[in-house]
Amino acid sequence: MPFDFDNITKYRAIFKPKNIDTLKPECFAYIGKEMIVRAVWIEDSGPYKGQWIFQQKIPDNLDLTNWMPCFLPEEDFEFLND
């Protein structure tokens, strides 16, 4: 991963989920789309253990204060360089 997660928390990324079986319905509309995400924690157990978990910004909120209630694993994103 080409980012320093300790110093930067917001990223541009394309949402490419590896497994859609457990994806929340409200997240399906964003598959294949670019979005702004923020790192919120590192998962310490389960299938995503050791991965950063991200939260997506609500697209029509330009001031970056509202975030979706979906928490998505690092493996579901293609991160873009600014």
Image (tube, helix red, strand yellow):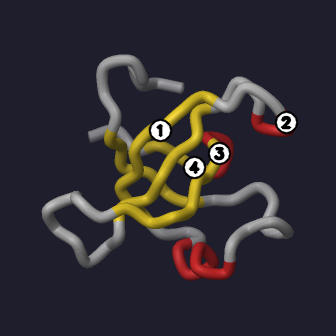
Q: Earlier in the sequence, mark 2 or mark 3?
A: 2
Reply above or below: 49 against 77.
above
Task: Nearest to the eye among marks 4 and 3: give it.
Answer: 3
Residue drawn 37% across the image and 62% down it: 67
The Cα atoms of the two marked residues, 4 and 1, are separated by 15 Å
The Cα atoms of the two marked residues, 2 and 4, are separated by 19 Å
Residue position marked by numbered label 2 in the rendering: 46
Q: Nearer the viewer, residue 48 or 17?
A: 48
Task: Residue type at mark 2: give it.
Answer: Gly
Task: Nearest to the eye among marks 2 and 4: give it.
Answer: 2
Residue 3 in which image quadrant: top left
Q: Nearer the viewer, residue 29 or 68?
A: 68
Instruction: Name the mark on residue 16.
Output: none
Secondary structure found at label 4: strand
Residue 47 in which image quadrant: top right
Task: Nearest to the eye among marks 3 and 1: give it.
Answer: 1
